[in-house]
Image (cartoon, rainbow, N blue to C red):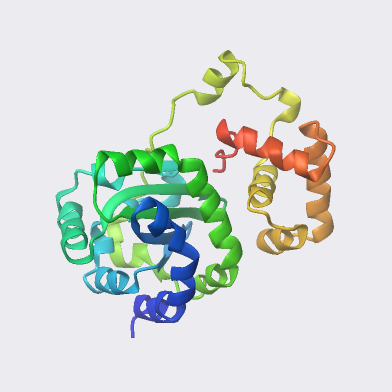
Amino acid sequence: MTSSDEMLKRTSFLYHEKIKKSSAPLSTYFSITHFSYVKITNSSRISILSNRPEWLEHYLGEKFYLVQPHFRRHPNTYQTGITLPGQIPDREYRSAMEIAQNDFLIHPGLVITQKRSDGVELFGFDLKCSTPILNELLINELPLLRKFTEKFREENIFLFNLLDDYQFDLQDIMGKDFRFDTENAAMTLPNRNLCLREMGFGLDKSATLSTREIEVLQFLLQGASASIIAEELNLSKRTIEHYVERLKNKLVCYSKMELIAKAREIEQLGYLCNIS
């Protein structure tokens, strides 16, 4: 049994009912027929979770990940944002997606990309059919979809930890096709910080955030406690508490809830994407 087969068996198949229950609102209110989670680490290892294990089994069996443009790039080329898989022109990828559409009623919708210090995460939302109305709905309700990913992680944190035990190596499989381009995989505004300052949204120099502070804020936005953040970042709980207090001082907040609200505001401006 290959590592990808083992990953599928031990995660998406074994916990299918729980994943299905957690993602049920997506089908009910958005006509989303497929929800997926992918993590690619900086060491080129990948793990995949899906609420449609029968599709993931076919996807892995046919090795469609070899023609998936999102998987051909090293995480250092990613930034937090979104991508629209339906607009990808790659011929091989489109052929694979035709099978998803015709045999599994999975039409490309939207992918939320989240840059992490140890790699990149991708949350996929695919539709039962591709129409302008449904695609626009995904974009217009992007904040709600982001909130869903946070809730899904919170309810299934054990699955995210389990996935780390069942990764397989993309670079080993793809060889030279696994690219380390410096070009960003997601469209972002050049000179974003300069633009923000000219619009009056710039952070004071005294509020400039370090990479570690950005990581702590990202975990706070996910609802993580100091103990969980400490475990994830391999630091002590006291160190995390120190970071929280320092962030409150930097961002002029008087409570943790106020800090989280401020973090949400600066996240929307893109200041929490700058992890290299």
Q: Residue 11's spot in the image, x, y percent? A: 45, 76
Q: Determine the residue located farthest toward the front in the rendered image.
A: 28
Above-or-below relation of 150 to 144: below
Foreground: 215 or 256? 256
Foreground: 184 or 124? 124
Which residue is painted at 17% across and 62% down in the image? 99
Q: Residue 65's spot in the image, x, y percent? A: 28, 62
Which residue is painted at 40% across and 71% down in the image? 168
Q: Quadrant of residue 208?
A: top right
Q: Residue 246's spot in the image, x, y percent? A: 81, 40
Which quadrant of the rendered structure holds the N terminus? bottom left
Residue 69 showing in the rendered view = no
Q: Residue 222's spot in the image, x, y percent? A: 63, 53
Q: Determine the residue located farthest toward the top in the rendered image.
A: 198
Residue 56 showing in the rendered view = yes
**Side of 155 where 231 appears, left or right:** right
Which residue is painted at 50% across and 65% down in the image? 22
Above-or-below relation of 127 to 246: below
**Side of 185 where 81 appears, left or right:** right
Which residue is painted at 53% across and 71% down in the image? 159
Above-or-below relation of 179 to 272: below
**Side of 243 where 38 appears, left or right:** left
Above-or-below relation of 15 to 201: below
Which quadrant of the rendered structure holds the C terminus? top right
Q: Quadrant of residue 229?
A: bottom right
